[in-house]
C-alpha cells in the first residue's frame, strides 16, 4: 500500500490551486479578445470619420483597460508569487516598475475614456417629436444599450418609439428611447465607479508590495489596509451585483473573474507576509 504523506497532499493541493488560478487568468485573456471586438464595432457608430490618436482612449476604452489590467495582473503575480523577494532588485525590479508604470498610464487613460463615454450618454437631450422615424436620414444611429449601437432605419426607429420619450445627441448623430438611455446611463456610471475603485485597489496593492520588499508593515497599518480594502472590494461587489440585476451577463462574468483573480493576488500577499513572519520568528529563536 502506498502511503501519501501530508507534504505530498499539500503539494498536490497547491498544484490544483495553481492550475485553477491560471485557468481564471486565461479566461480573462479570452474576455480581452471579446472586449476588443466590441469596442471595434461600437467605434463604427461613435467615430464614423475614423478614430484619431486622441480618440483612442474613448473609442477603445474597454480594450485598453482590459489589456493594461491583464498585464498588471501578471506583473503582480510575478511580484507576489512567482519571483522570490530576494530576486526583486536591480534591473529586474526596474523593468517591473517601468512596465507597471506604463500599465498605470493606460489604466488612467481608460478611466478617462469611461468618463468620456459617460459624457456621451449623458449628452442626450429630450425632443418633442411624434416618432423617432422622423429622424431617419437626419440622425444615423440609435442606442440599443451601452456600447451597443445600430443604424437608424425606417424599421429600427420603431424600437426607439417603444422605449418612451425620445432623446437625441446631435454631436454624435444618435437617437435613443428613454428606457434604453436610462439603462445606458446607469451602466455608464457604474463603469466609472468600478474603474475608479480598481485604481484605488491596485495602488494600495503596490504600496503593499513596496512595504513588503522593505521589511513589511506594522500591525496597525495592516488593520487600516484591510479596512480600506474591505470597503473597496465591497464597492466592486455592489457593481457586480448591479450588473447581474441588469442582466449584463458579460459584464457580470468579467467582474466576477477579476474579483477572483485579485483574491489570488491578496492570497499571495498573505502567504508572503506569513513567510516573512516565520523567518523573523525563526531568526529570533536562533
Image (spheres, grey):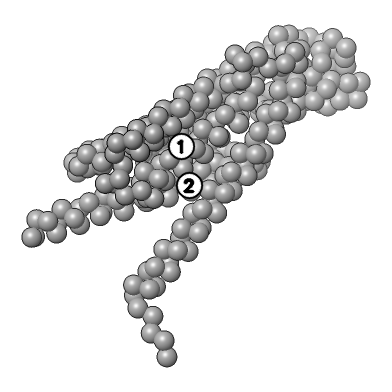
User: For the residue carrying disc 2, how many other residues have a C-alpha within 10 Å: few (<14), some (14-19), or many (20+)?
Assistant: some
Residue located at (40% from left, 41% from top): 76
Residue 216, compared with residue 116, is above or below; it is: below
* Label 2, label 1: how far apart the Cα atoms are: 12 Å
Describe the element under mark 1 as helix, strand or loop.
helix
Residue ID for mark 1: 72
Describe the element under mark 2 as helix, strand or loop.
helix
Query: Which x, y percent locates residue 208?
Result: 30, 39
The circle on residue 198 is none
Residue 205, compared with residue 283, is above or below; it is: above
Query: Which x, y percent locates residue 256?
Result: 54, 45
Residue ID for mark 2: 261
Give the residue at the far front of this rendering: 91
Q: Quadrant of the N terminus?
A: bottom left
Query: Which x, y percent locates residue 216?
Result: 22, 42
Inspect this view and state whether residue 186 appears: no
Report the side of 220 relative to 7 (left or right).
Answer: left
Q: Nearer the viewer, residue 104 or 127?
A: 104
Residue located at (41% from left, 63% from top): 14
* Label 2 vs label 1, nearer the camera: 1
Residue located at (26% from left, 46% from top): 86
- The part of the image, by quadrant, that contains residue 88 is top left
Amino acid at each position: 500500500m502506498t502511503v501519501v504523506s501530508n507534504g505530498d497532499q499539500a503539494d498536490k493541493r497547491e498544484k490544483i490551486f495553481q492550475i485553477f488560478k491560471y485557468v481564471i487568468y486565461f479566461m480573462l485573456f479570452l474576455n480581452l479578445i471579446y472586449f476588443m471586438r466590441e469596442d471595434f464595432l461600437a467605434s463604427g457608430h461613435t467615430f464614423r470619420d475614423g478614430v484619431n490618436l486622441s480618440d483612442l482612449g474613448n473609442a477603445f476604452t474597454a480594450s485598453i483597460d482590459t489589456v493594461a489590467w491583464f498585464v498588471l495582473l501578471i506583473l503582480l503575480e510575478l511580484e507576489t508569487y512567482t519571483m522570490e523577494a530576494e530576486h526583486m532588485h536591480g534591473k529586474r525590479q526596474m523593468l517591473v516598475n517601468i512596465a507597471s508604470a506604463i500599465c498605470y498610464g493606460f489604466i488612467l487613460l481608460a478611466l478617462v475614456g469611461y468618463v468620456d463615454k459617460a459624457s456621451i450618454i449623458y449628452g442626450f437631450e429630450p425632443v418633442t417629436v411624434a416618432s423617432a422615424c422622423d429622424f431617419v436620414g437626419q440622425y444615423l444611429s440609435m442606442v440599443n444599450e451601452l456600447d451597443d449601437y445600430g443604424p437608424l432605419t425606417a424599421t429600427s426607429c420603431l424600437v426607439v418609439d417603444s422605449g418612451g420619450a425620445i432623446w437625441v445627441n446631435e454631436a454624435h448623430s444618435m437617437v435613443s428611447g428613454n428606457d434604453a438611455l436610462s439603462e445606458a446611463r446607469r451602466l455608464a456610471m457604474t463603469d466609472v465607479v468600478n474603474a475608479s475603485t480598481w485604481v484605488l485597489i491596485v495602488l494600495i496593492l503596490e504600496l503593499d508590495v513596496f512595504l513588503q520588499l522593505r521589511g513589511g508593515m506594522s500591525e496597525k497599518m495592516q488593520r487600516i489596509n484591510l479596512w480600506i480594502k474591505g470597503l473597496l472590494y465591497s464597492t466592486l461587489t455592489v457593481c457586480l451585483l448591479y450588473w447581474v440585476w441588469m442582466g449584463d451577463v458579460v459584464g457580470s462574468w468579467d467582474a466576477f473573474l477579476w474579483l477572483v483573480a485579485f483574491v489570488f493576488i491578496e492570497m499571495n500577499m498573505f502567504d508572503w507576509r506569513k513567510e516573512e513572519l516565520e523567518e523573523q520568528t525563526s531568526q529570533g529563536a536562533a
